[in-house]
Amino acid sequence: MDEIGNAYDAEATAAERLLGTAVSPDDPDRAIIEPWANTVAGPILDVGSGTGRWTGHLVQRGHDVTGLEPAERLLRIARKSHPAVRFCHGSISDLVLAERRWVGILAWYSVIHMGPDELPTALATLQQALDPNGTMLLSFFSGPHLQAFDHPVAVAYRWPMADMRHALTEAGFEVIDQHGEPSAIHAHMIARQAR
């Protein structure tokens, strides 16, 4: 994952141009993220917060959100773009040592660069960081087969819906909502700790 952080840190990547620093009024992801955030009665952790656009957007809407980002350059951009918002330098693996639990975890395309060797550990770490009464919103690239593909920053993976659901279940989650079409690449799931 250090290589991924370095890739996003590279000036040549210009991730801020890919991601932007603010959420536009017509961003279709608002219809997914905002309703989920409204169900979270407590602090939210935005893992892989990038330029801070979703962290800042949700804070503006009255939510208690902290951004967690491994790429130092993106962290600087986030802090400059959203100076009143909390951002921490770190990755999912750093949550292993964290004592705090989050009522909501936003993992918006935060695990797309993780293959089958890395994803199970990351999901288990997120499960441990989630409050027993909390939920996680996870988005990813989907496809009919587990497949690596060239992403503008670094190699990313497409996961079949059933495989991602299985991976979440194995990590101790219960999937309570999912959306993904066989012909579409974008998918998301809402999960909570298994009862």
Image (spheres, rainbow, N blue to C red):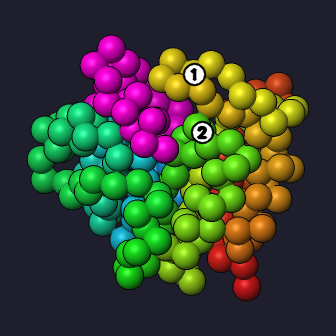
Q: Is residue 164 above or below residue 174?
A: above
Residue at numbered disc 2: 112
Residue located 30% across and 66% down the image: 64
Which of the pair 68/71 is nearer the observer?
A: 71
Residue located 36% across and 24% down the image: 15
Q: Position of residue 102 (x, y in %)?
A: 43, 73
Near mark 2 (Cα within 10 A), the count class, few <14, some 14-19 or many ≥20, is many
Q: Quick check: can you spot residue 57?
A: no
Whether residue 126 sits left or right of residue 119 in the image: it is: left
Residue located 39% across and 38% down the image: 5
Between discs 1 and 2, the one toward the N terminus: 2
Q: State the CA–CA distance, disc 1 to disc 2.
A: 9 Å
Residue 7 in the magenta stretch? The answer is yes
- Magenta span covers which residues? 1-30
Q: Amino acid at mark 2?
A: Ile
Q: Amino acid at mark 1?
A: His
Residue at numbered disc 1: 151
Q: Is residue 183 above or below residue 1?
A: above
Q: Quadrant of the C terminus?
A: bottom right
